[in-house]
Image (cartoon, rainbow, N blue to C red):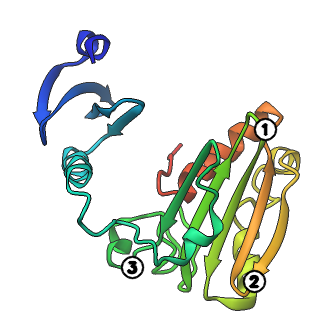
């Protein structure tokens, strides 16, 4: 926090935690970033103050319902012991405000799927330079076609081929995809698409 304070615009207190606020001009806007260190080994980075406030509040009130409850089927397909892992559950209530949401037909940054349930990812680069994504949907036989659309061969043929993508059906409506991240160009292309898959589209 001492190092962050040297470059931050200001230090504020949110939910009892010191938070460093950064501002960066981008085109016609000013982008704000909020950085907090609520626990040893834990860093929170947010671009929305209300989101950060809710996360810090949830940390203090462990008895409250989890944002992603253990009853979600996605938890069966993620290795929480991996070096990096995550879960995304698709929420229809927020689909209109989310250009990456699979609900509501084709949007600027989505894979349309009215039966979409969720997505998990895991990666342990210390062991192997690969990433695994598992996609869950109630769309039945269409799920493979939907998942293959994440990296269509027509978009960036060379980079997509360099990922050596392997698909594996784990059960009805569950497909697992493995990506080779050992080469730099395919790696960059993977992260460009991956960020969109987890709700952080980049527009170029």
Q: Nearer the viewer, mark 3 or mark 1?
A: 1
Q: Going by the image, does 71 lie left or right of 113?
A: left
Q: Identify the element where label 2 is drawn.
A: strand
Image coords of residue 64 (percent x, y): 23, 66
Does label 3 or label 1 sit earlier along the sequence? 3
The front one of 203 and 130 is 130
Q: Identify the element where label 1 is drawn.
A: loop
Q: Identify the element where label 3 is drawn.
A: helix
Residue bearing mark 2: 171
- The image shows residue 169, relative to residue 63, as above or below, that is below
Q: Residues within 10 Å of mark 1 (few under 14, many from 20)?
A: few
- The image shows residue 93, relative to residue 99, as above or below, that is below
Residue at 39% in and 35% down: 42
Q: Nearer the viewer, mark 2 or mark 1?
A: 1
Location of residue 145 (image quadrant): bottom right
Image coords of residue 112 (percent x, y): 57, 76
Q: Going by the image, does 59 lie left or right of 167?
A: left
Disc ID at residue 127? 1
Residue bearing mark 3: 92
The front one of 102 and 10 is 10
Q: Nearer the viewer, mark 2 or mark 3?
A: 2
Location of residue 151 (image quadrant): bottom right
Image coords of residue 179 (percent x, y): 79, 51
Q: Residues within 10 Å of mark 2 (few under 14, many from 20)?
A: few
The front one of 187 and 5 is 5
Residue at 55% in and 78% down: 73
Alpha carbon distance from label 3 to label 1: 36 Å
Alpha carbon distance from label 2 to label 3: 24 Å
Q: Residues within 10 Å of mark 3 (few under 14, many from 20)?
A: some
Does label 2 or label 3 sit earlier along the sequence? 3
């Amino acid at each position: 926090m001492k190092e962050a304070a040297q470059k931050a615009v200001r230090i504020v207190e949110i939910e009892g935690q010191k938070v460093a606020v950064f501002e960066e001009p981008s085109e016609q806007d000013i982008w704000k970033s909020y950085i907090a260190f609520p626990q040893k080994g834990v860093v929170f980075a947010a671009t929305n103050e209300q989101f950060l406030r809710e996360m810090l509040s949830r940390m203090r009130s462990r008895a409250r319902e989890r944002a992603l409850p253990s009853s979600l089927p996605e938890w069966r397909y993620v290795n929480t012991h991996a070096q990096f892992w995550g879960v995304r559950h698709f929420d229809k209530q927020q689909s209109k405000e989310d250009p990456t949401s699979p609900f509501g037909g084709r949007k600027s940054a989505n894979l349309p799927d009215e039966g979409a349930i969720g997505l998990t990812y895991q990666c342990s680069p210390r062991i192997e330079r690969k990433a695994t994504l598992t996609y869950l949907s109630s769309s039945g036989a269409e799920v493979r076609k939907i998942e293959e659309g994440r990296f269509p061969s027509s978009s960036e043929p060379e980079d997509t081929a360099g990922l050596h993508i392997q698909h594996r059906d784990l059960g009805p409506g569950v497909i697992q995809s493995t990506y080779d991240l050992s080469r730099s160009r395919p790696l960059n292309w993977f992260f460009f698409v991956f960020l969109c898959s987890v709700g952080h589209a980049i527009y170029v």
